Amino acid sequence: MKSWLFAASCVVLPALWGVAMYFAFGAVERRRKRLLPKDPPPPIDYSI
Amino acid sequence: MLVAGQEVSVIGLLALGSAVGFVAGLFGIGGGFILTPLLSVVFDIPLPVAIGSGLCQMVGTATVAFLKHRKLGQGEPRFDWLMLAGALLGVAAGAKVVALLELGGDATLVLYVTYIVFLLGVALTLLRPPRGGADALSVVRRGPLARIELPPYVDFPRLPLSRVPALVVAYLGLALGFLSGLLGVGGGVALIPITLYGFGFPIKHAAGTGILVLFATSVSGTVAHARLGHVHLPLALTLLAGSSISAQLGALATHRLPVSVLRRGLAALILVTVAALGWALARRL
């Protein structure tokens, strides 16, 4: 493989992986936030 | 996987990538300063190949950091732009020095000693308690580097910090770029203490500054080392696959630990890496 082509692939492939991970984990984080209860029930008062 | 004539376990590489990624996520750093020496010490990969491949995998982690950083908007972009040209020159010079050392036949010895000195400096800075307590780091102070009288001066309105000598920042970029090309580190582990203690940035902005330079140096360092034949692409992608997932887990765990514990933990980890390097160096002598 030509050296400039190899050098370009050494930059492009990890960068593409990085972009994919950014969007994948972004989607996971958004989903996690969406599933959080909007109005959590009040803590149980055990005092007597 | 065959890397520079050495048979290397893919599972071992994935495990190393995952461990370094977790630590990187936990401490909010790139992790290159641990990954590169461990590739050489644990897997016996020639150091120039470990440096080039470490920088190549850093392109992936730096891309994620850059995209996240754009969203958060922390840091001082003027500082990054001032460092950029020097950093790019420094990376090319560092990669050239690695190639010259390789030709001379003593690359491993010189680079191991340089790593040990660099890492010890970082560990000692981390172990020193901050003056005025941890709370003092959350506000702008005028650090010793910002007080140097050397025109021209530049203002950093986001911090805010005014009348900072521009040449000091530019030469800092050159030094960090050189370290990046020479040792395969992103430079964040050195830059954060310098911006925090040297210039007096608040901790929030110290962590966000330098991401653009990290991204640019990892890209130009990868190109420079790839052209010298120091990058093993499958090795870099395997490490990246391991580190990118565990880095998210590390970032989640970081909120559960106090800052002082994190700081001492990172210093301990660096000292363990120094000990491993010292042991490997003693074996070679």
Image (cartoon, grey):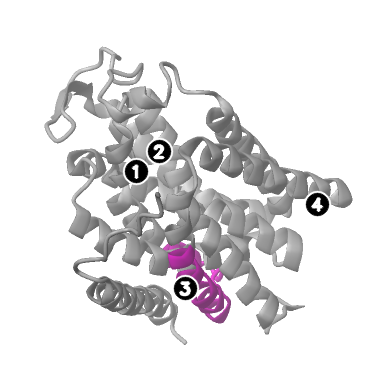
Residue shown at 21% from the left, 44% from the top? B81
> Which of the chains bears the disc numbered 1?
B
Residue shown at 55% from the left, 39% from the top? B261
At label 3, counting other C-alpha atoms closer than 10 Å, the crowd grade (few under 14, some 14-19, many 20 or more) is some
Residue B226 shown in magenta: yes
Q: Of circles 3 and 2, which is in front?
A: 3
| Marked residue nearer the N-terminal end (1 or 2) | 2
| Residue where numbered disc 1 is placed | B207
| Marked residue nearer the N-terminal end (3 or 1) | 1
- Judge if badges 3 and 4 mark residues of a common chain: yes
Q: Residue furthest front?
A: A48
Q: CA distance from mark 4 to mark 2?
A: 28 Å
Q: Amino acid at mark 4?
A: Ala
Residue A36 shown in magenta: no
At label 1, counting other C-alpha atoms closer than 10 Å, the crowd grade (few under 14, some 14-19, many 20 or more) is many
Is B155 situated left or right of B65 in this image?
left
| Residue where numbered disc 3 is placed | B245
Q: CA distance from mark 3 to mark 1?
A: 21 Å
Task: Give coordinates of residue B80: x percent, y percent.
Answer: 25, 44
At label 2, counting other C-alpha atoms closer than 10 Å, the crowd grade (few under 14, some 14-19, many 20 or more) is many
Which span is picked out in magenta?
A: B222-249
Is B69 situated left or right of B121 in this image?
left
Q: CA distance from mark 1 to mark 2?
A: 6 Å
| Residue where numbered disc 2 is placed | B192
| Marked residue nearer the N-terminal end (4 or 2) | 2
Q: Determine the image quadrant of residue B72.
A: bottom left
| Residue where numbered disc 4 is placed | B280
Residue nearest the viewer, comparing B159 with A28:
A28
Residue shown at 49% from the left, 54% from the top? B26
Task: Give coordinates of residue B199: x percent, y percent.
Answer: 32, 25
Q: Does residue B17 sit above or below B29 in this rendering?
A: below
Look at the image and tell me in which quarter the N terminus of chain B lies: bottom right
